[in-house]
Protein backbone atom coordinates (compact mmCIF):
# COMPACT_ATOMS: atom_id res chain seq x y z
CA UNK A 1 0.00 0.00 0.00
CA UNK A 2 1.41 3.36 -0.99
CA UNK A 3 2.09 6.23 1.37
CA UNK A 4 -0.53 8.35 -0.38
CA UNK A 5 -3.29 5.90 0.56
CA UNK A 6 -2.19 5.57 4.20
CA UNK A 7 -1.97 9.34 4.73
CA UNK A 8 -5.11 10.76 6.34
CA UNK A 9 -6.73 13.53 4.32
CA UNK A 10 -8.46 15.00 7.38
CA UNK A 11 -6.04 16.94 9.62
CA UNK A 12 -5.82 15.83 13.20
CA UNK A 13 -8.03 18.11 15.29
CA UNK A 14 -5.56 18.86 18.08
CA UNK A 15 -2.67 19.41 15.65
CA UNK A 16 -4.83 21.62 13.43
CA UNK A 17 -5.78 23.75 16.42
CA UNK A 18 -2.12 24.32 17.39
CA UNK A 19 -1.86 27.47 15.26
CA UNK A 20 -0.35 29.56 18.05
CA UNK A 21 2.37 26.97 18.67
CA UNK A 22 3.22 26.90 14.97
CA UNK A 23 3.25 30.71 14.72
CA UNK A 24 5.57 31.01 17.73
CA UNK A 25 7.99 28.54 16.11
CA UNK A 26 7.92 30.44 12.81
CA UNK A 27 8.49 33.80 14.51
CA UNK A 28 11.40 32.33 16.44
CA UNK A 29 13.06 31.07 13.25
CA UNK A 30 12.30 34.16 11.15
CA UNK A 31 13.10 37.83 11.53
CA UNK A 32 10.65 39.95 13.50
CA UNK A 33 7.56 41.00 11.57
CA UNK A 34 7.98 38.72 8.53
CA UNK A 35 5.49 36.00 9.52
CA UNK A 36 2.10 36.86 8.05
CA UNK A 37 -1.38 35.41 8.16
CA UNK A 38 -2.15 31.72 8.57
CA UNK A 39 -2.76 30.24 5.12
CA UNK A 40 -3.66 26.58 5.56
CA UNK A 41 -3.19 23.43 7.61
CA UNK A 42 -2.17 20.36 5.61
CA UNK A 43 -2.34 16.79 6.83
CA UNK A 44 1.00 15.01 6.43
CA UNK A 45 -0.13 11.73 8.00
CA UNK A 46 -1.69 10.35 11.16
CA UNK A 47 -1.50 13.08 13.81
CA UNK A 48 0.98 15.13 11.70
CA UNK A 49 -0.07 18.57 10.38
CA UNK A 50 1.87 21.34 8.60
CA UNK A 51 0.76 24.93 9.17
CA UNK A 52 1.52 27.47 6.43
CA UNK A 53 2.02 31.19 7.11
CA UNK A 54 2.59 34.04 4.69
CA UNK A 55 6.15 35.34 4.36
CA UNK A 56 6.57 39.12 4.27
CA UNK A 57 10.33 39.00 3.81
CA UNK A 58 11.57 41.24 0.99
CA UNK A 59 12.58 39.16 -2.02
CA UNK A 60 10.49 36.12 -0.97
CA UNK A 61 7.21 36.95 -2.64
CA UNK A 62 4.85 33.99 -2.56
CA UNK A 63 7.00 31.97 -0.12
CA UNK A 64 5.47 30.51 3.01
CA UNK A 65 6.67 29.48 6.45
CA UNK A 66 5.88 25.78 6.94
CA UNK A 67 5.72 24.55 10.54
CA UNK A 68 5.06 20.86 11.11
CA UNK A 69 3.55 19.71 14.42
CA UNK A 70 2.64 16.23 15.63
CA UNK A 71 1.40 14.33 18.67
CA UNK A 72 1.86 10.80 19.89
CA UNK A 73 -0.93 8.25 19.89
CA UNK A 74 -3.36 8.67 22.80
CA UNK A 75 -1.61 11.90 23.80
CA UNK A 76 -3.09 15.37 23.82
CA UNK A 77 0.31 17.12 23.86
CA UNK A 78 1.22 18.63 20.46
CA UNK A 79 4.95 18.93 19.80
CA UNK A 80 6.98 20.76 17.19
CA UNK A 81 8.71 18.81 14.41
CA UNK A 82 10.38 21.35 12.11
CA UNK A 83 10.19 24.87 10.72
CA UNK A 84 11.22 25.70 7.18
CA UNK A 85 10.64 28.36 4.51
CA UNK A 86 9.17 26.81 1.36
CA UNK A 87 8.16 28.28 -2.03
CA UNK A 88 4.48 28.57 -2.85
CA UNK A 89 2.71 27.95 -6.16
CA UNK A 90 3.25 31.55 -7.35
CA UNK A 91 6.56 32.27 -5.61
CA UNK A 92 9.59 33.82 -7.24
CA UNK A 93 12.27 31.11 -7.54
CA UNK A 94 15.73 30.98 -9.11
CA UNK A 95 16.17 29.00 -12.33
CA UNK A 96 16.95 25.32 -12.12
CA UNK A 97 20.59 24.66 -11.31
CA UNK A 98 22.67 23.49 -14.25
CA UNK A 99 26.11 21.85 -13.75
CA UNK A 100 29.06 23.96 -14.78
CA UNK A 101 30.04 21.41 -17.44
CA UNK A 102 26.69 22.05 -19.18
CA UNK A 103 26.77 25.84 -18.70
CA UNK A 104 30.29 26.33 -20.06
CA UNK A 105 30.52 27.64 -23.60
CA UNK A 106 33.50 28.36 -25.86
CA UNK A 107 34.97 31.75 -24.99
CA UNK A 108 33.73 31.77 -21.36
CA UNK A 109 37.15 31.07 -19.86
CA UNK A 110 39.06 34.22 -18.94
CA UNK A 111 42.50 35.02 -17.50
CA UNK A 112 43.15 33.10 -14.30
CA UNK A 113 40.25 30.65 -14.80
CA UNK A 114 40.95 26.92 -14.48
CA UNK A 115 39.07 24.36 -16.58
CA UNK A 116 39.46 20.87 -15.05
CA UNK A 117 39.08 17.83 -17.28
CA UNK A 118 37.50 14.60 -16.14
CA UNK A 119 39.69 11.57 -15.55
CA UNK A 120 37.70 9.63 -18.18
CA UNK A 121 37.38 12.47 -20.71
CA UNK A 122 36.62 10.84 -24.07
CA UNK A 123 38.59 13.56 -25.85
CA UNK A 124 41.84 12.36 -24.25
CA UNK A 125 43.73 9.12 -24.03
CA UNK A 126 46.93 8.04 -22.24
CA UNK A 127 50.10 9.34 -23.81
CA UNK A 128 51.84 6.04 -23.04
CA UNK A 129 49.72 2.86 -22.91
CA UNK A 130 52.45 0.30 -22.32
CA UNK A 131 51.41 -1.77 -25.34
CA UNK A 132 54.89 -1.48 -26.84
CA UNK A 133 57.45 -3.19 -24.64
CA UNK A 134 60.46 -0.95 -24.02
CA UNK A 135 63.80 -2.28 -25.21
CA UNK A 136 66.28 -3.80 -22.73
CA UNK A 137 68.06 -1.37 -20.41
CA UNK A 138 65.36 1.22 -21.11
CA UNK A 139 65.15 4.22 -18.82
CA UNK A 140 61.38 3.69 -18.63
CA UNK A 141 60.24 0.53 -16.77
CA UNK A 142 57.84 -1.97 -18.32
CA UNK A 143 54.86 -1.25 -16.07
CA UNK A 144 55.03 2.52 -16.22
CA UNK A 145 51.66 4.29 -16.43
CA UNK A 146 50.89 7.85 -17.57
CA UNK A 147 50.28 8.88 -13.97
CA UNK A 148 53.49 7.27 -12.77
CA UNK A 149 55.43 8.81 -15.64
CA UNK A 150 54.02 12.25 -14.82
CA UNK A 151 54.92 11.80 -11.14
CA UNK A 152 58.47 10.75 -12.04
CA UNK A 153 58.85 13.71 -14.37
CA UNK A 154 57.53 16.13 -11.74
CA UNK A 155 59.75 14.66 -9.04
CA UNK A 156 62.84 14.95 -11.22
CA UNK A 157 61.94 18.52 -12.20
CA UNK A 158 61.69 19.44 -8.51
CA UNK A 159 64.98 17.72 -7.73
CA UNK A 160 66.83 19.40 -10.58
CA UNK A 161 65.26 22.75 -9.63
CA UNK A 162 66.45 22.30 -6.04
CA UNK A 163 69.98 21.54 -7.25
CA UNK A 164 70.02 24.69 -9.36
CA UNK A 165 68.81 26.70 -6.36
CA UNK A 166 71.67 25.34 -4.28
CA UNK A 167 74.05 26.47 -6.98
CA UNK A 168 72.81 30.00 -6.62
CA UNK A 169 70.09 30.10 -9.26
CA UNK A 170 66.94 31.44 -7.62
CA UNK A 171 64.80 31.58 -10.72
CA UNK A 172 62.89 28.46 -9.69
CA UNK A 173 62.50 27.28 -13.29
CA UNK A 174 62.85 23.48 -13.56
CA UNK A 175 65.73 22.36 -15.77
CA UNK A 176 65.50 18.96 -17.45
CA UNK A 177 68.80 17.20 -16.85
CA UNK A 178 70.21 15.06 -19.63
CA UNK A 179 69.78 11.33 -19.05
CA UNK A 180 66.84 11.62 -16.66
CA UNK A 181 63.42 10.08 -17.18
CA UNK A 182 62.04 13.54 -17.91
CA UNK A 183 64.50 14.06 -20.74
CA UNK A 184 63.80 10.62 -22.20
CA UNK A 185 60.06 11.16 -22.00
CA UNK A 186 60.41 14.55 -23.64
CA UNK A 187 62.57 13.14 -26.41
CA UNK A 188 60.13 10.31 -27.14
CA UNK A 189 57.10 12.60 -27.03
CA UNK A 190 55.76 11.06 -23.81
CA UNK A 191 56.13 14.07 -21.53
CA UNK A 192 52.33 14.54 -21.57
CA UNK A 193 50.34 12.12 -19.41
CA UNK A 194 47.37 12.31 -21.83
CA UNK A 195 47.06 13.14 -25.50
CA UNK A 196 44.20 13.79 -27.88
CA UNK A 197 42.12 10.69 -28.63
CA UNK A 198 40.61 9.82 -31.99
CA UNK A 199 37.22 10.95 -30.73
CA UNK A 200 38.67 14.25 -29.52
CA UNK A 201 40.39 14.69 -32.88
CA UNK A 202 37.15 14.10 -34.78
CA UNK A 203 35.01 16.51 -32.75
CA UNK A 204 37.71 19.18 -33.03
CA UNK A 205 37.83 18.70 -36.79
CA UNK A 206 34.03 18.96 -37.02
CA UNK A 207 34.08 22.15 -34.95
CA UNK A 208 36.77 23.76 -37.08
CA UNK A 209 35.07 22.73 -40.32
CA UNK A 210 31.80 24.23 -39.12
CA UNK A 211 33.45 27.59 -38.38
CA UNK A 212 35.92 27.77 -41.27
CA UNK A 213 34.87 25.11 -43.75
CA UNK A 214 33.64 24.80 -47.29
CA UNK A 215 29.96 25.31 -46.36
CA UNK A 216 30.41 28.77 -44.84
CA UNK A 217 29.14 31.81 -46.79
CA UNK A 218 32.69 33.20 -47.02
CA UNK A 219 33.98 30.02 -48.64
CA UNK A 220 31.04 29.85 -51.04
CA UNK A 221 31.90 33.31 -52.38
CA UNK A 222 35.69 32.87 -52.36
CA UNK A 223 37.58 32.90 -55.67
CA UNK A 224 39.72 29.89 -54.69
CA UNK A 225 40.16 27.49 -51.74
CA UNK A 226 42.84 27.76 -49.07
CA UNK A 227 44.68 24.70 -50.34
CA UNK A 228 46.17 26.85 -53.13
CA UNK A 229 46.75 29.96 -51.01
CA UNK A 230 50.26 31.07 -50.16
CA UNK A 231 49.19 32.29 -46.71
CA UNK A 232 48.26 28.77 -45.56
CA UNK A 233 50.49 27.14 -42.92
CA UNK A 234 49.97 23.34 -42.97
CA UNK A 235 49.54 21.46 -39.72
CA UNK A 236 51.60 18.48 -38.64
CA UNK A 237 50.43 14.89 -38.54
CA UNK A 238 47.25 13.59 -40.08
CA UNK A 239 45.50 16.97 -39.74
CA UNK A 240 47.65 18.44 -42.51
CA UNK A 241 45.53 16.50 -44.99
CA UNK A 242 42.47 18.61 -44.20
CA UNK A 243 43.46 21.70 -42.18
CA UNK A 244 45.97 24.49 -41.89
CA UNK A 245 46.46 27.84 -40.16
CA UNK A 246 45.73 31.11 -41.95
CA UNK A 247 48.56 33.65 -41.84
CA UNK A 248 46.91 36.49 -43.76
CA UNK A 249 46.41 39.41 -41.37
CA UNK A 250 43.60 40.81 -43.54
CA UNK A 251 41.66 37.55 -43.64
CA UNK A 252 38.76 36.93 -41.23
CA UNK A 253 40.44 33.62 -40.35
CA UNK A 254 43.86 35.05 -39.48
CA UNK A 255 45.49 32.82 -36.85
CA UNK A 256 42.62 30.31 -37.02
CA UNK A 257 42.58 26.67 -38.06
CA UNK A 258 40.87 26.55 -41.46
CA UNK A 259 39.80 23.75 -43.73
CA UNK A 260 41.70 23.33 -46.96
CA UNK A 261 38.37 23.78 -48.71
CA UNK A 262 37.74 27.12 -46.99
CA UNK A 263 38.47 30.34 -48.80
CA UNK A 264 38.09 34.11 -48.65
CA UNK A 265 38.75 37.18 -50.72
CA UNK A 266 42.27 37.43 -49.32
CA UNK A 267 43.55 34.48 -51.37
CA UNK A 268 47.14 35.06 -52.40
CA UNK A 269 46.37 34.43 -56.09
CA UNK A 270 42.87 35.90 -56.24
CA UNK A 271 43.80 39.47 -57.23
CA UNK A 272 47.34 39.55 -58.57
CA UNK A 273 48.42 43.04 -59.63
CA UNK A 274 48.55 43.17 -63.46
CA UNK A 275 51.74 44.13 -65.28
CA UNK A 276 51.88 47.71 -66.63
CA UNK A 277 50.40 47.80 -70.16
CA UNK A 278 52.75 48.45 -73.11
CA UNK A 279 51.86 51.55 -75.13
CA UNK A 280 50.34 50.91 -78.56
CA UNK A 281 52.35 51.94 -81.65
CA UNK A 282 51.76 55.47 -82.96
CA UNK A 283 49.17 55.77 -85.72
CA UNK A 284 50.61 59.10 -86.92
CA UNK A 285 54.36 59.13 -87.39
CA UNK A 286 55.58 62.58 -86.40
CA UNK A 287 59.24 61.66 -86.27
CA UNK A 288 59.77 60.72 -89.92
CA UNK A 289 60.19 63.09 -92.95
CA UNK A 290 58.48 62.94 -96.30
CA UNK A 291 60.18 64.31 -99.52
CA UNK A 292 58.18 66.87 -101.54
CA UNK A 293 59.30 68.66 -104.81
CA UNK A 294 59.84 72.42 -104.47
CA UNK A 295 58.24 73.22 -107.86
CA UNK A 296 55.32 71.63 -109.50
CA UNK A 297 56.06 69.58 -112.59
CA UNK A 298 56.07 71.48 -115.89
CA UNK A 299 53.59 71.28 -118.67
CA UNK A 300 56.05 69.49 -120.92
CA UNK A 301 57.63 72.65 -122.36
Image (cartoon, rainbow, N blue to C red):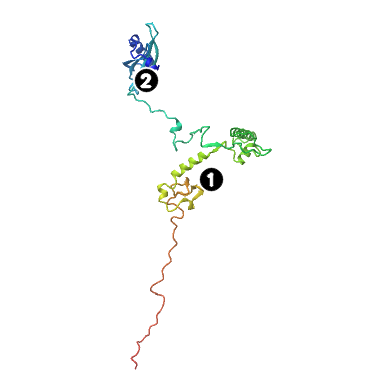
Q: Secondary structure at mark 2?
A: strand
Q: Is residue 66 left or right of residue 201?
A: left
Q: Pick whichever, 81 or 155, lies toward us.
A: 81
Relative to 294, say whether 144 is above or below. above
In the image, 92 versus 259, the foreground residue is 259
In the figure, residue 280 lies in which quadrant? Answer: bottom left
- Tell me where residue 58 appears, x and y as whole percent: 34, 22
Residue on which disc 2 sits: 86
The quadrant of the rendering that contains the C terminus is bottom left
Residue 53 is situated, as x and y percent measured from the top left of the image, at 33, 16
Q: Tag 1's secondary structure?
A: helix
C-alpha distance separating marks 2 and 1: 58 Å
Q: Which mark is residue 238?
A: 1
Give above or below for 87 relative to 141.
above
Q: Earlier in the sequence, mark 2 or mark 1?
A: 2
x and y percentages locating residue 173 in the rendered image: 59, 36
Mark 2 is surrounded, within 10 Å at the Cα level, by few (under 14), some (14 to 19) or many (20 or more) other residues, namely some
Give the label, 2 or 1, closer to the camera: 1
Residue drawn at (45%, 31%) of the image:
100
Residue at the extreme front of the image, as rendered = 1
- Residue 43 picture quarter: top left
Q: Is residue 264 above or below residue 123?
A: below
Residue 115, horizontal then vertical, whole percent: 49, 34
Residue lying at the far bottom in this picture: please name it.
301
Amino acid sequence: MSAATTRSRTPDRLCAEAVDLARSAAEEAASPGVVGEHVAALSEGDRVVTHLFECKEMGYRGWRWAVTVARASRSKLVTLDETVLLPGPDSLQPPEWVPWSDRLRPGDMGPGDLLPTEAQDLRLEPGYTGEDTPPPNSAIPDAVTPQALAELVEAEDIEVSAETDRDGDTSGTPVTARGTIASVAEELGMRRARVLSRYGLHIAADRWDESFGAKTPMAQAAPAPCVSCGFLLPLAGSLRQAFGVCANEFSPADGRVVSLAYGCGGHSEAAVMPTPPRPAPHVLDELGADAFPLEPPGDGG
